Image: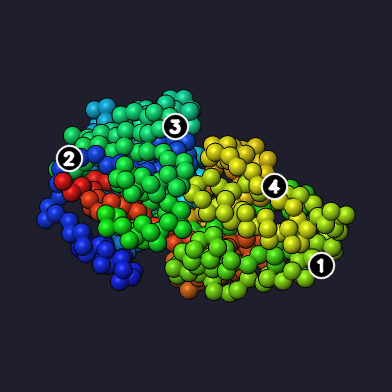
Amino acid sequence: MPRYLRRSCATALFCLAFASSAAPAAPVAGGTLNFVVTPEPPSLVNLATSAVPVLKVSSKVTEGLLAYDFKFNPTPQLATAWNISPDGKRYTFTLRHGVKWHDGKPFTSADVAFSLELLKKIHPRGKSTFANLTAVRTPDPYTVVLELSQPAPYLIKAFAASESPIIPKHIYEHGDALSNPNNSAPIGTGPFKFSKWVRGSYIEYVRNPDYWDKPRPYLDKIIVKFIPDAAGRAIAFENGSVDLGGDTPVPLGDLARLKNNPKLGLETSGYQFEAGPQRLEFNLDQPILAKLPVRQAIAHALQREIIKSAVFYGYANVIHSPILPGSPYYSAAPSPYSFDLKQANALLDQAGYPRRADGNRFTLTLDPLPIGDTPARTASYVKSALARIGIAITIRAQDLPAYLKRVYTDRQFDFVVNGMSNLFDPTVGVQRLYWSQGYRQGVPFTNASHFSNPEVDRLFALAAVETDQAKRLAQFTQIQQIVGQQLPDINLVGPQQITLFNKRVHEHTPTPNGLDGNFATLYLSP
């Protein structure tokens, strides 16, 4: 049984399933991997977006300075060595020699400096991740020195390809980075080269014969397929036309059947960077939802256990915090707004929204994130739950680009169902959602609620530089308490994500990035 399966095998049933499909003694070269990603990504480079489908495809071409093991210890990728000064204000990276971009140009420290400075400006988390970065020096082509104004205890964990992609300066240095053609036809340093993108159908990547980590990669080709229908994806796994998919790619109700298929396996590891709560996020600029009693009433009307059982078939944990229980900074304090329909109705009456003759008080539009089926299923539950307190809900369906534009650019929404990754540290994964400077119109997956609280801002600023873990825990605990009271959002459950794979696929999850990794180690049984 592969090492990563032994580590993450959670039940006897899974372990028996894995043990019955031993991998070859050595990796096998060749073959085509059929990899399903849904929905179709809006970009092929995660320079200015953290959308999950983009992370799945970007890292096959575009790499980071570091990778990480399952204890979040850094390991080499484009950087072979790194050093942090005793005061925590200087990071020095030694770069790998002999690496070339896919167009033949040499990879140098100038590419790294350009990438980090651009990420700070346009990545959804860049402004907070690199908040303390004041200068990037390049004393020679293979050395990069980051100068910080203050220590950043989380920063060494921020250099994976899925978080901080290194892009070619010679491609991006002229013109608008957001509209650069490279975003749709990328040139990188990774194990696979972009071949073509047939919109609405598939992306094709081919093996990079000049990859620096020879003899990797083992695959000849990756075909990234888009199958919008969840039931259709389940059929594709059963008939062998799809080999691999993540983020629970099939309906949860189908898992009981699929995990008994002798050709298929399930994996729950590989989401340590991606795990995050499913939540309702309110537009605090919307007049009705700007009133705290209305948000409190909505919180009182929801039953998280029903969402866990009916929407997620038990594959989730009930939560009340934006920080998940697996984090050392998680606060176990319960929500101050327990299920209470009587209190919910009273709050709405007091807020000046009595029931009309039809029984409704007002109507809101709810936009579920169009990734997977659980946001839409949660939206259906929320609609029925809020009907009990006289709030009529219209659920709006749309594709991912339309959703992102509506919520983050046009801001024409009332509230949404979405999921936001905690990532490797709350300063990076959580701060962007509640920090007033995280409100960045046009930048996806930031502070869409337009929440602004000076005390929360102050605590985030302290936690971003605090090296004492006890003090940092106290700061994040206070943040969770304030957010839980003020309700810019309602955190509902922490989903348990699942990777589904054909057992001929090996080494798909060698790091905590899971399928967001580069697939250099992945190989297929003959």
Label 2 element class: loop
Looking at the image, tell me whether mark 1 or mark 4 is earlier in sequence order: 1
Give percent across and percent down for residue 27: 15, 50
The number of numbered discs placed on residues in the rendered structure image is 4
In this picture, residue 366 sits left or right of residue 94: right
Q: Which residue is mark 3?
A: 200
Looking at the image, tell me whether mark 3 or mark 4 is earlier in sequence order: 3
- The span from disc 3 to disc 2 (Cα, nearest Å) is 27 Å
Give percent across and percent down for residue 51: 47, 44
Label 3 element class: loop
Label 1 element class: helix
Circle on res. 273 = none
- The span from disc 3 to disc 4 (Cα, nearest Å) is 28 Å
Looking at the image, tell me whether mark 1 or mark 3 is earlier in sequence order: 3
- The span from disc 1 to disc 3 (Cα, nearest Å) is 48 Å
Give percent across and percent down for residue 114: 39, 36
Q: Which residue is mark 1?
A: 346
Q: Residues within 10 Å of mark 4 (few under 14, many from 20)?
A: some
Q: Amino acid at mark 2?
A: Gly
Mark 3 and mark 2 in contact? Answer it, CB < 8 Å.
Answer: no
Q: Which residue is mark 2?
A: 30
Looking at the image, tell me whether mark 1 or mark 2 is earlier in sequence order: 2
Q: Which residue is mark 4?
A: 394
Whether residue 455 is visible? no
Residue found 35% across the figure and 54% down from its top: 500
**Of discs 4 and 2, which sits in the foreground?**
4
